Amino acid sequence: FVAGQPSIIPYSWDNLAVANGVSYTITADIATAIGGPADYIQVTPTVAMKMKINGNANAIIDLPANATQIFNPGDLQATILAFANATGTDGTVDIFVSGSSRQV
């Protein structure tokens, strides 16, 4: 690392199980994993599901099955993602996040 420069902190959840009938109880706690909000988020579910961002009922998006949703730096800063699955089929989701930490 270089003093005064941001360090990139990556983290991933691979095959996070989201069973049919789950309603926002399966979470990816980004703040705990990387020590703050994510600047970059990539999410790929195996079945269609919904994702709630930062626990906000007004920030729920539909995720199509086997499609990757990407949020680039500046799109949003998320600290927790929660998932709901009402497809009739159990599924999983792969999540990759990164954030930055300024080192002094």
Image: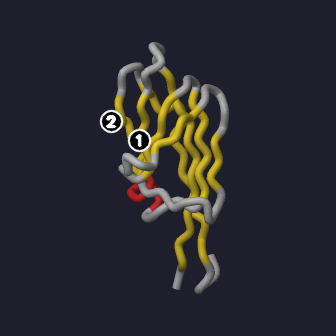
Quadrant of the rendering where the N terminus is positioned: bottom right
Element marked by disc 2 = strand
User: Is residue 63 positioned above or below 30 on the image?
Assistant: above
Extreme residue toward the front, this view:
58
Type of amino acid under label 1: Ala
Element marked by disc 1 = strand
CA–CA distance in space, label 1 to label 2: 7 Å
Q: Which residue is mark 2?
A: 25
Please state the horizontal and vertical placement of residue 82, each as a whole percent of the image: 41, 41
Please state the horizontal and vertical placement of residue 5, each as a whole percent of the image: 62, 81
User: Is residue 73 positioned above or below 53 on the image?
Assistant: below
**Residue at image x 36%, y 36%?**
24
Q: Which residue is mark 1?
A: 82
Mark on residue 1?
none
Number of other residues with Cα within 10 Å of mark 2, as a class: few under 14, some 14 to 19, many 20 or more: few
Name the residue nearer the viewer: 56 or 19.
Answer: 56
Name the residue nearer the viewer: 10 or 46.
Answer: 46
Type of amino acid under label 2: Thr
Q: Does the residue at mark 1 contact the one at mark 2 (Cβ under 8 Å)? A: yes
